[in-house]
Image (cartoon, rainbow, N blue to C red):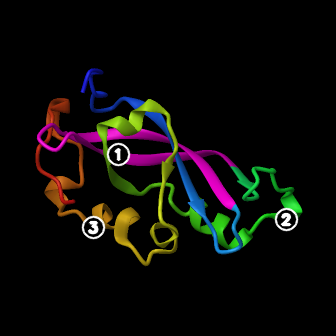
Amino acid sequence: MSIEPKEIGEQFSVQFVWRIPDGDFLRSLFAVEVLARDSLSEKYVILLKEFTAARQESSEGTMRSLEELNKEYWVLVSELVGKRISLAYEADDGRPLWLRLETLTGEHNFFSRLNELPPALSKRPPNGEESDQFAG
């Protein structure tokens, strides 16, 4: 990796994209904070701090109006705020991360597996030290 990874406490934006059953795409942007780094696997543990932007578009790329939005899925997206997840260092480059719909619906544990950390791992390391121990 040529670019240095973010430090613990630094923030950046992450964009997630899902394709929903009707063929539309959901795009969401979150402000995230680095909670820990695993230098061995080159991954961050991040906190989804704020849901900052979103859009729903057709398979042809046309943006949907507010009346056309699939509210069921947008509720699930908004509920991701406060979740901890593990992402590769490359996720901080701003490119969209395409995810399976099951990650949003909870059928896959991508957004839940790090939210049940043991107490010793659920907090930031003391003095901002890098942590090489986390689940996932």
Using the rendered view, name the quadrant where residue 128 is placed. top left
Residue assigned mark 2: 68
Asked whether residue 28 is drawn in magenta, I would say: yes
Q: In terms of secondary structure, what is the magenta stretch mainly?
A: strand
| Location of residue 131 with respect to 24 vertically, above or below | above
Residue at screen point 85% across, 58% down: 66
Residue 14, x across and y down, in percent: 49, 41
Image height check: is 118 above or below 42? below
Identity, as a three-letter code, of the amino acid under mark 2: Glu
Q: Estimate how packed mark 2 is, as few (under 14), some (14 to 19) or many (20 or more) residues with alpha carbons within 10 Å.
A: few
Looking at the image, which is closer to me, 95 or 109? Answer: 95
Q: Any mark on residue 46, and which?
A: 1
Q: Is residue 23 left or right of residue 35?
A: right
Residue interval drawn in magenta: 25-54
As drawn, is 95 to the left or to the right of 28? left
Whether the residues at callouts 3 and 2 have beta carbons within 8 Å, the answer is: no
Sequence-wise, which precedes: disc 3 or disc 2?
Answer: 2
Q: The residue tagged with tag 1: helix, strand or loop?
A: strand
Identify which residue, 100 or 117, lies in the foreground.
100
Which of the two discs, 3 and 1, sits closer to the camera?
A: 1
- Tell which circle, 3 or 1, labels the residue nearer the N-terminal end: 1
**Front position among marks 3 and 2:** 2
Give the Cα separation between the discs numbered 3 and 2.
35 Å
Residue for badge 3: 116
Q: Residue furthest bottom?
A: 107
